[in-house]
Image (spheres, rainbow, N blue to C red):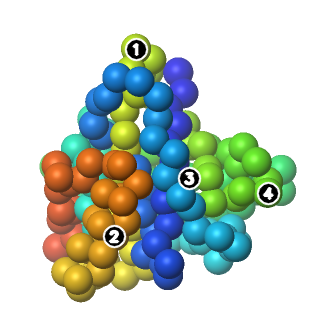
């Protein structure tokens, strides 16, 4: 029922989140020290991701909102076949001492026979310089997350937004 993934942060935002199936346990990527959850809230554009079963459209963005119970409302939107679609999920901080690790569940069923790495590169701007994207990929690779299959997100022709 629940699909969780780990968010990995670069030294400065852009944020990188971590679909590639693997046998065995999840990788334990290093996360940004002194991570400021409040600063992380708000609107992020998807720059790149591992091929995932959801989010097939373009102009993908996500809005994170901190709720009073310290859970996080996650609203992602995309344009698919000319329609603006939204999915909503919930983020849970498993350890308040380590808020950079966020579990997020969307309402999708997943078999738990093996784990799947989800990785995204998110940005506050709709596009990022290639060098920044390369730096983000290096950080994934250094944390044993294979991003060789990462695909660039389409952020062109996005007149409809969240
Ligand atoms: C993000 O969500 C909050 C709370 O639901 C809302 O007030 C805000 O306008 C949203 N921001 C964007 C960019 O959609």
- Mark 3 CB lies closer than 8 A to ligand 1: no
Is there CB contact under 8 Å for labels 4 and 3? no
Q: Is residue 90 above or below residue 14?
A: above
Marks 4 and 2 close (CB-CB < 8 Å): no
- Image coordinates of residue 133 in percent, x first then y, are 26, 74
> Is the C-beta separation of discs 4 and 1 under 8 Å?
no
Residue 120 sits in quarter: bottom left
**CA distance for labels 2 and 3:** 22 Å
Find residue 97 and name its label.
4
Q: Secondary structure at mark 2?
A: helix
- The residue pinned by badge 1 equals 113
Where is residue 134? Give x, y as percent: 24, 73
Q: Which numbered disc covers residue 159? A: none
Q: Is residue 133 above or below residue 103?
A: below
Q: Earlier in the sequence, mark 4 or mark 2?
A: 4
Which is nearer the N-term, disc 4 or disc 1? 4
Q: Is residue 133 above or below residue 104?
A: below
Q: Rate crowding at label 3 as few (under 14), some (14 to 19) or many (20 or more) other CA atoms within 10 Å.
A: many
What residue is disc 2 on? 136
């Amino acid at each position: 029922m629940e699909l969780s993934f780990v968010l990995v942060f670069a030294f400065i935002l852009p944020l990188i989140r971590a679909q590639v199936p693997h046998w065995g346990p999840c990788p334990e990527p290093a996360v940004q020290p002194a991570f400021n959850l409040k600063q992380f809230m708000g609107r992020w554009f998807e720059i790149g991701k591992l091929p995932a079963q959801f989010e097939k459209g373009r102009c993908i963005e996500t809005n994170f909102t901190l709720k009073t119970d310290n859970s996080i409302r996650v609203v992602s939107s995309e344009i698919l076949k000319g329609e603006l679609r939204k999915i909503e999920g919930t983020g849970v901080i498993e350890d308040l001492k380590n808020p950079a690790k966020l579990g997020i569940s969307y309402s999708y069923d997943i078999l738990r026979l093996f784990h799947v790495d989800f990785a995204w590169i998110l940005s506050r701007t709709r596009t990022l310089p290639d060098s920044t994207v390369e730096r983000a990929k290096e950080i994934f690779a250094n944390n044993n997350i294979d991003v060789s299959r990462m695909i660039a997100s389409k952020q062109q022709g996005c007149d409809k937004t969240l």
